[in-house]
Image (cartoon, rainbow, N blue to C red):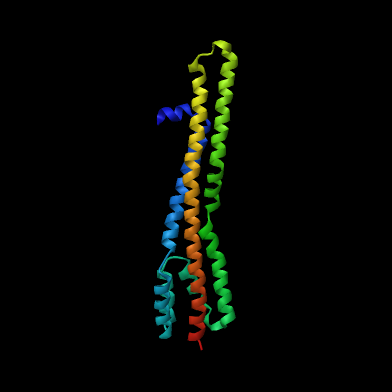
Amino acid sequence: MPTLLASGGPVIWLILIAAATAAVVFVERALFCHRSQINSAEFLNGVRTVLKRDNVVEAVSICDATPGPVARLVKAAILSRDKGRDRVREAVEEAGLTEVPQLEDRLNLLATIAQISPLLGLFGTIVGFIRVFMNLQTAGLYAHLDTLSAGIWESLICAAAGLAVAIPAHAAYNYLVSRVNKIVLDMERAAAEIVNIVTENGK
């Protein structure tokens, strides 16, 4: 591996930086999604039970103790329970507008890395072939294979490295998008249900 890196030329380091960035973003976002995902049905059942006893303080405490955007949406609805159904719905929507960008944070960076990595590989390939032709021009017809092999190695390594970064980065991006979409769907379902729970309880 060190030999391959040494033979990859300067562009290989750009590709490695892109790979390290993609790995860090993926791990951080995967952990964030894992913490944000809860059993919303079970959580809402617990909140409903507490609200039926008119124990608003305990319901808010449950929301505070539960991680993730669903709990924060529910808390916003509970805190607006005395202001009417329309205001409860608005409070939930406002909370959702705050939560969704946090879920999607840095996903564009991962998508960008997936898109530019093959281009970096292509750039390294072109740089490698430029080196080949420069060496060939310098050595003329008597160019030795060793004179040309460095540029060829650089071209092949950069092309392979660009694809090796782009493929898992693209897969990681699609995986995270699916996780975010699932959480957003849970938020939408929970929002509709908590509006009904709070307004019914307030009657």
Farthest residue to the front: give it: 141
Is residue 137 at all visible to an observer of this figure? yes
Farthest residue to the bottom: give it: 203
The residue shown at (59%, 19%) is 134
Rendered position, 142 above or below 201: above
The residue shown at (54%, 49%) is 111
188 to the left or right of 50 = right
Residue 17, percent across and down? 49, 39
Q: How many marks?
A: 0
The residue shown at (57%, 11%) is 141
Rendered position, 44 above or below 54: above
Quadrant into which the N terminus falls: top left
Residue 79, percent across and down? 51, 77
The residue shown at (53%, 45%) is 114
Q: Is 160 in front, or is 31?
A: 160
Residue 124, percent across and down? 55, 31
Is residue 9 at all visible to an observer of this figure? no
Q: Is 22 in front, or is 139?
A: 139
Residue 61, percent across and down? 41, 74
Rendered position, 155 above or below 52: above
